[in-house]
Image (cartoon, rainbow, N blue to C red):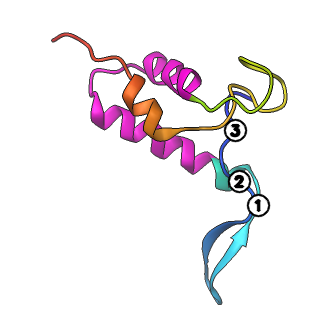
Amino acid sequence: IDLAAPGVEVWTAASVSGARPKTGTSFAAPFVAAAAALMKSANSSATAVDIHDALGKSAEDLGAPGKDAVVGWDLLNARAACVVTPKKAM
């Protein structure tokens, strides 16, 4: 695990009922992908390594300091990740 993101009871579109809550990594991964896309749009020269590192550095610590086996680098914080994404000189 690298990073925790919302993945329990995430409201999703449903073909028959309109919307329903779902649980699983398939519903958590889009939160991280969206955060990475926001970071890239804020700094188009950011590399994949820059984005990975910024996601880890900006995560909200849920347990022991630093990365751990249960929640990785802790809880995704997309806003903070955009702030810590390094700006590259042109």
Residue furthest top as drawn: 89
Callouts 3 and 1 close, C-beta under 8 Å: no
Q: Which residue is mark 3?
A: 4
Q: Is residue 41 magenta?
A: yes
Residue for point 39% across, 23% down: 85
Q: Quadrant of residue 59?
A: top right
Is 49 left or right of 47, judged from the image as shown?
Answer: right
Q: Residues within 10 Å of mark 1 (few under 14, many from 20)?
A: some
Residue for point 65% across, 50% down: 28
Closer to viewer: mark 3 or mark 1:
3
Helix, strand or loop for the magenta stretch, by majority: helix
The N terminus appears in which quarter of the rendering?
Answer: top right
Q: Earlier in the sequence, mark 3 or mark 1?
A: 3
Q: Quadrant of residue 36?
A: top left
Is 66 left or right of 64, judged from the image as shown?
Answer: left
Q: Position of residue 54 (x, y in %)?
A: 49, 22
For the residue marked with disc 2, what is the amino acid? Gly
Is 88 left or right of 53, judged from the image as shown?
Answer: left
Q: Secondary structure at mark 2?
A: loop
Residue for point 29% across, 34% down: 42
* Label 3, label 1: how far apart the Cα atoms are: 13 Å
With respect to residue 20, does 84 lie above or below?
Answer: above
For the residue marked with disc 1, what is the amino acid? Thr
For the residue marked with disc 3, what is the amino acid? Ala
Is 76 left or right of 79, judged from the image as shown?
Answer: right
Q: Which residue is mark 2?
A: 7
Q: Which residue is mark 1?
A: 23
The C terminus appears in which quarter of the rendering?
Answer: top left
Task: Give the extent of the magenta segment.
Answer: 29-58
